[in-house]
Amino acid sequence: MRSKRNGTQRPTALVTGGSGGIGLEIAKVLARNGFDLVLVARTRDTLEAAAGQLEGKYGARVHVFAAHAVVDEILGG
């Protein structure tokens, strides 16, 4: 997926667990390398804080989705 900003196309990456830890570090590397991001994690507040940091520091466009998937519920277990 690519998004358009200022007439240029940027690739978009989906990062799960993007509000902290390894997921946030991966998001930083992607943003630094010209990616826009879709971040998914359980807590909206921490997602929005991470998005603000990434947008401000790297100029990435960041969309956030607060979601929690439990494997047992998905698999019917």
Image (spheres, rainbow, N blue to C red):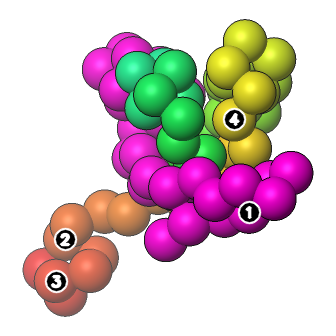
Residue to which mark 4 is pinned: 60
Whole-angstrom CA distance, mark 2 to mark 4, is 34 Å
Whole-angstrom CA distance, mark 3 to mark 1, is 37 Å
Whole-angstrom CA distance, mark 2 to mark 3, is 5 Å
User: Given the image, on which type of amino acid does mark 2 rest?
Assistant: Asp
> Between disc 2 and disc 4, whose residue precedes?
4
Question: Label 2 crowding class (10 Å Cα cut-off): few <14, some 14-19, many 20+?
Answer: few
Looking at the rendered image, the quarter that the C terminus falls into is bottom left
The quadrant in which residue 75 appears is bottom left
User: Given the image, on which type of amino acid does mark 3 rest?
Assistant: Leu
**19 displayed left or right of 63:** left
Residue to which mark 2 is pinned: 72
- Residue 34 image offset from top left, x and y in percent: 54, 35
Range of the magenta residues? 1-27
Q: Residue at x 71, y 55 (%)?
A: 8
Residue to which mark 3 is pinned: 75
**2 displayed left or right of 59:** left
Residue to which mark 1 is pinned: 4
Say if mark 2 contacts mark 3, CB within 8 Å. yes
Whole-angstrom CA distance, mark 4 to mark 3, is 35 Å
Question: Label 3 crowding class (10 Å Cα cut-off): few <14, some 14-19, many 20+?
Answer: few
